Amino acid sequence: MPKDLYTLKAESYSQVMEAIPELIEAYKNRGVLVIKGYNFSIEEHKNLARLFGDNLGWHINSSVEDSYIDRFFIHGGHSDNPDREYNNGINDYVLDWHIEQVFYKCPPLAGIWCMKEITCPPGSGNTLFADSNEIYESLSEEDKKFLSGAVVSWDKPANNHVGPFYTRAVDTHPITSAPIIRVETDRGCYVMPALHSLHNRPATSDEVKRFEEIMASIKTKLTDDYELRYVQQWEPGDIIVVDLFRMYHAVLGGFKYNERSMDLIVARSPLQCEDVYNDPNILIG
């Protein structure tokens, strides 16, 4: 059985505002939560992001204007392309398991996602989440030590940047200081990361193979371990607040064109840099 997703059922905006302290704690402890029962206006959606940002050190907070938030306000849902064939069943991946944009030095920290309209059959278009810290803690002590000393190289165009990129396989969470696996697993979008160095020296062929085996086991865990995941079965008006630094996530199918429409706010670090990790000499300290 999947894990219980922390859920606030609210009938009014004031009820959500009163619950902000407990929502902040749920976000820190679990990495993802959902608010159900109330249809947020766009302004209320933005204000919710501001309040979380005030408490969690995001670049979106009460000091910024609406016009600034609009730069990070996205319309999405994976059903807006009329030329796409929507043949995925409810258990097929539309978007495979992934973690957000690890190549940026100031990566996305959180998503505040609002489902505006979903008209596909119930149980379709679900979003799945899994805690990368929990995955890390499930590894053997030897594998933890191995990954914690690993730098990976991988390739993906990123705006005006072209790889390869070099990133730590395990990073420290900016709020909780917990170890977080930050290695991409979506084979549909990325050239898969390869082990570049280990404990500040070039990796051997045996170590490269061991890294591949560890990552294969992690991908299997994401795909097959239902007790690891949280499942969001969407209803109109639902808002998910998710820690994008920490949580692997995926999207399942079963929907057609224009049946799944969302407004998404993406929060980042206040530093707001566009720099990428492209130095092959990145060190593990």
Image (cartoon, rainbow, N blue to C red):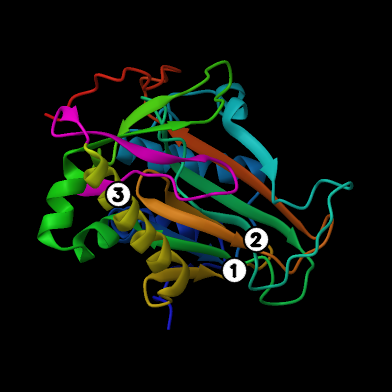
Dot 2 crowding, Cα within 10 Å, few <14, some 14–19, many 20+? many
Q: Residue at x 29, y 61 (%)?
A: 135
Circle on res. 209: 3
Against 211, is 226 above or below?
A: below
Q: Residue furthest front?
A: 205
Say which label, 3 or 1, has the lower sequence index.
1
Say which label, 3 or 2, has the lower sequence index.
3
| Residue 138, x across and y down, in percent | 22, 66
Range of residues picked out in magenta? 176-203
What's under tag 2, amino acid-wise?
Gly
Circle on res. 237: 2
Q: Which residue is mark 1?
A: 37
What's under tag 1, amino acid-wise?
Gly
Q: Residue furthest bottom?
A: 1
What's under tag 3, amino acid-wise?
Lys
Task: Give SS at disc 2.
Answer: loop
Against 166, is 126 above or below?
A: below
Looking at the image, residue 52 sits to the left or right of residue 205; the answer is right
Against 202, is 160 above or below?
A: above
Label 3, label 1: how far apart the Cα atoms are: 49 Å
Against 198, is 218 above or below?
A: below
Taking depth in this image into account, of 192 and 62 the one nearest to the observer is 192
Looking at the image, residue 257 sits to the left or right of residue 232; the answer is right
- Is the C-beta separation of discs 1 and 2 under 8 Å? yes
Q: Nearer the viewer, mark 3 or mark 2?
A: 3
| Residue 182, x across and y down, in percent | 34, 43
